Image (cartoon, grey):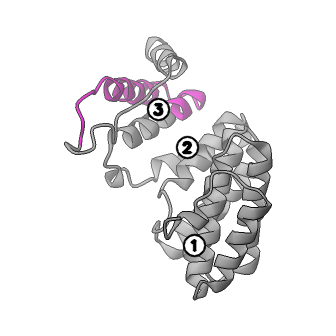
């Protein structure tokens, strides 16, 4: 077993659990313990097996409860929980976790240790859950986002697509068209941004996403 394999399991059973707990107990420092919990929880949350996902949720909740002072791991863990629930269309829980991370951005004036996009994910959650009374808040989150921080085309596509859709639902048609056009242009870029990592930054837009953007342009 490699040195880091013990906290990167993609499945779970009694033997794996016993080894993980023994290794976690031997690990030194709260920072390391919290990080190992978060990483292992993340691997299990990415599983398609419901039992593994449940273990991942329990480990992440344990991280938040037992290591509240380890802000670096806890905040990232909160965002991962938001991602998990958003992917499963549990918008209420997704919003709850993304709000925690967004508040952290505001309180600490720092996005370090996260994807740096949890506020955009909060806006996406509001949009997808059709909370019309919060569309103004979602739009404000997107328009106040530091877009100069976006480096890769897939992140720029995510931003422009989201802004196009939000602008459309609040009836700002001109802006919606502007960002829809930019998003479509980004989706057509096939040249790698990094010569050694040819897939990094490439946009993987679905037919539904592109069709929606085309509809916004056609309005």
Measured Cα–Cα span from mark 1 to mark 3:
33 Å
Along the viewing direction, whichever of 23 and 117 lies nearer the viewer: 23
Residue at point 47%, 72% (across, down):
109
In the rendered structure, find residue 161 and report the number of the disc placed on it.
Answer: 3
Percent x, y for residue 34?
62, 76
Marks 1 and 2: in contact by CB < 8 Å?
Answer: no
What is the magenta segment's predominant secondary structure? helix
Q: Is residue 63 visible?
A: no
Give the residue number, with chain letter if any, for mark 1. Answer: 35
Residue at point 56%, 82% (across, down):
31
Residue at point 59%, 77% (across, down):
71
Foreground disc of the pair 2, 3: 3
Start-end of magenta stretch: 164-193
Give the residue number, with chain letter if any, for mark 2. Answer: 139
Q: Quadrant of residue 40?
A: bottom right
Residue at point 57%, 73% (across, down):
35
């Amino acid at each position: 077993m490699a040195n880091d394999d013990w906290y990167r399991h993609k499945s779970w059973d009694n033997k794996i659990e016993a080894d993980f707990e023994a290794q976690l107990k031997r690990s030194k420092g709260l920072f390391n313990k919290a990080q190992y919990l978060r990483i292992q929880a993340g691997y299990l949350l990415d599983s398609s097996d419901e039992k593994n996902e449940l273990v991942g949720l329990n480990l992440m909740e344990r991280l938040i409860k037992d290591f509240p002072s380890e802000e670096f791991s806890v905040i990232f863990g909160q965002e991962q929980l938001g991602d998990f629930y958003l992917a499963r269309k549990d918008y209420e829980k997704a919003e709850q976790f993304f709000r925690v991370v967004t508040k952290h951005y505001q309180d600490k004036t720092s996005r370090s240790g996260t994807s740096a996009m949890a506020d955009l994910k909060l806006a996406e959650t509001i949009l997808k859950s059709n909370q019309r009374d919060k569309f103004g808040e979602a739009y404000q989150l997107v328009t106040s986002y530091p877009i100069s921080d976006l480096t890769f085309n897939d992140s720029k596509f995510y931003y422009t697509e989201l802004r196009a859709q939000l602008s459309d639902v609040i009836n700002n048609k001109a802006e919606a068209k502007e960002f829809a056009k930019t998003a479509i242009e980004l989706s057509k870029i096939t040249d790698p941004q990094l010569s050694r990592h040819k897939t990094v930054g490439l946009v993987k837009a679905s037919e539904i996403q592109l069709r929606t953007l085309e509809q916004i342009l056609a309005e």
